[in-house]
Amino acid sequence: MFCRIFRRVSHSLPLGICVKFAECACNTVAKMGKTVVRGVIRWLDLPPVWLFAMLGLSFALDQLVPGMGFEWWGGKAMGNAFVVLGVLLMGAAVIPFMLQKTSVIPRQRPKAFVKGGVYRISRNPIYLGDALVLAGCVLRWDVLPALLFVPAFVWIITARFILGEEAGLRDVFGAEYENWAAQVRRWI
C-alpha cells in the first residue's frame, strides 16, 4: 500500500522531495522496528521466561539423552513436593503485594514495602519458589544433570533482577530496607 502511494506521488514531485520522503519513511520504519525489538526483549527478560527456558532445557536434555537419572523411587515424590512447595511459596509471596497494591513486576517502582509474611524468611520468596519448581521438575523427570540448571537459574535471577530490585528498594525506602535486609537473607 505504502509503495503504491509513494510511486503515484513520486512521479509528480521533484527528485529531492522524493528522496527526503523516502529517507523519512525509512527512518520511521527503523524507529518502529527498534521500539518493537526493545518491547520484545523487555518482555522476554522477565523471571518466568527464564524459569520456562530452564524447564525447557531440562526437558530437552531428558528427551535428547534419556536415562541420565538414577530412577530413584523417591525422586518423583520429592519432585512433586518441591513443585507444590514452590507454587505455594509463590502464592504466599504474591498475596501481600496484591493487598498493598504494589507491583510484583521487576524494575517497576514499588508503591509499598512488603516485608511481612514469607518475606520474614526470604527477601525473594517468589524467586525461591521458582527455583523449587525448577528443582522439582528436574527430580520428577529424573534428569539429574539438569540440577546444574538450578544454581545457574539462581545466578541469572540474582544478576539480572535481584541486585537491581535491591538497589531500587534501597533508593525508595532507605534505612527501612537496610534494616530489613540485614535481618533477612536474600534467598533462604
Image (tube, grey):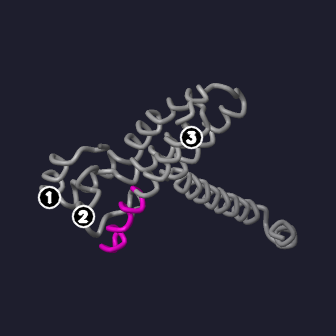
Residue at screen point 71% across, 34% down: 63
Mark found first going from the N terminus, 1 or 2: 2
Highlighted range, magenta: 89-103
Label 3: how many Cα within 10 Å (few below 14, some 14–19, many 20+)? some
Residue type marked 3: Lys
Crowd rating for badge 1 (residues with CA inside 10 Å; few <14, some 14–19, many 20+) = few
Residue designated by label 1: 176
Q: Which three-letter amino acid code belongs to the residue tagged 1?
A: Glu
Q: What's the CA distance linking mark 3 and mark 1?
A: 42 Å
Using the image, determine if residue 68 lies above or below residue 85.
Answer: above
Distance from disc 1 to disc 2, alpha carbons, whole Å, reads 9 Å
Quarter holding the N terminus is bottom right
Secondary structure of the residue carrying numbered label 3: helix
Extreme-front residue of the structure: 73
Of callouts 2 and 3, which one flags the residue occurring earlier in the amino acid sequence?
A: 3
Residue flagged by tag 2: what amino acid is it?
Phe
Above/below status of 123 relative to 150: below
Horizontal side of 4 relative to 30 (left or right) equals right
Query: What residue do we see at 50% from left, 29% from top?
Result: 148
Query: Which residue corresponds to the image point at 52% horizontal and 55% vertical from the top-left?
Result: 42
Name the residue that disc number 3 marks.
Answer: 76
Return the residue at label 2.
113
Res 158 → quadrant: top left
Q: Residue at x 59, y 55 (%)?
A: 40
Earlier in the chain: of badge 3 and badge 1, it is 3
Q: Position of residue 163 (x, y in %)?
A: 32, 45
